[in-house]
């Protein structure tokens, strides 16, 4: 965790925290709480009506994202009132972009969660062929998923661009990164850290 490295401060909120100013080129990036926590296009898992939202910036090729995903799932199940917004940030190359496109495209088939879970369970680097096989084995037709992406390409591409711009403006340096309340937790985090972060926001 970066103590009080408060992304809300970038948006002019929460006076008293350490001020981190965006560069001139990032000055117009919207990192308001509404933009980060409630992007209408970004998929969410867990309780859609949860009282607390956890945001995760991730990449399907990131080993730490994948190894930490069961921790996020465990805390989400245990809590029962947690909404988790998944922010694709494909920074590990072309296969990462392809994976994001397909899984986001699978939303049109009602297969987002299946795609997410299947790729998060892979190990090591991905290739387009391995992505296709993994999704197909999980019941997600990659051709239909790509068709879903193409049908919603403008919206999905804009989401990926927003995710990237937000991550850079917030000051993230890699994946995974989690945001709970006003705090940023870079890197893999254990269950107790997530539970405490959620509890602290509820008490605030």
Image: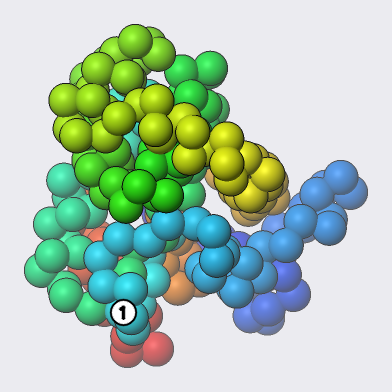
Query: At 25% from the left edge and 17% from the top edge, which residue is drawn?
Result: 133
Q: Nearer the viewer, residue 3 or 83?
A: 83
**Residue farthest along the right direction in this orientation:** 24
Q: How many marks?
A: 1
Give the image location of residue 161, x and y in percent: 67, 43
Query: At 50% from the left edge and 57% from the top edge, which residue is drawn?
Result: 42
Quadrant containing the N terminus is: bottom left
Q: Nearer the viewer, residue 56 or 191?
A: 56
Q: Does the image show residue 160? A: no
Q: Nearer the viewer, residue 3 or 62?
A: 62
Quadrant containing the C terminus is: bottom left
50 relative position to 30: left or right: left
**Residue farthest along the bottom direction in this orientation:** 203
Note whether 137 is above or below 105 in the view shown.
above
Note whether 64 is above or below 198 in the view shown.
above
Kindly state the secondary structure of the residue where label 1 is placed. Answer: loop
Q: Which residue is mark 1?
A: 50
74 relative position to 109: left or right: left
Give the image location of residue 98, x and y in percent: 48, 24
The quadrant holding residue 47 is: bottom left
Give the image location of residue 55, x and y in percent: 43, 59
Query: At 35% from the left edge and 15% from the top edge, which residue is drawn?
Result: 126
Give the image location of residue 92, x and y in percent: 49, 21
Query: At 29% from the left edge and 13% from the top edge, which residue is drawn?
Result: 130
């Amino acid at each position: 965790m970066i103590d009080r490295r408060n992304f809300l401060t970038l948006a002019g909120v929460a006076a008293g925290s350490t001020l981190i100013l965006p560069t001139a080129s990032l000055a117009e990036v919207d990192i308001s709480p509404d933009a980060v926590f409630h992007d209408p296009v970004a998929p969410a898992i867990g309780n859609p009506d949860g009282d607390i939202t956890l945001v995760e910036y991730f990449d399907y090729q990131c080993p730490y994202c994948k190894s930490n995903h069961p921790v996020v799932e465990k805390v989400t199940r245990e809590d029962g009132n947690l909404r988790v917004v998944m922010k694709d940030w494909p920074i590990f190359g072309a296969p990462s972009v392809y994976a994001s496109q397909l899984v986001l495209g699978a939303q049109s088939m009602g297969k987002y969660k299946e795609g997410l879970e299947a790729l998060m369970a892979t190990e090591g680097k991905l290739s387009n062929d391995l992505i296709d096989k993994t999704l197909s084995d999980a019941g997600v037709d990659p051709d239909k998923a790509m068709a879903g992406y193409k049908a919603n390409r403008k919206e999905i591409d804009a989401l990926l661009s927003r995710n990237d711009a937000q991550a850079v403006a917030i000051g993230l340096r890699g994946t995974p990164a989690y945001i709970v309340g006003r705090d940023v937790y870079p890197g893999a985090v254990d269950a107790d850290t997530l539970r405490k972060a959620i509890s602290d926001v509820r008490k605030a």
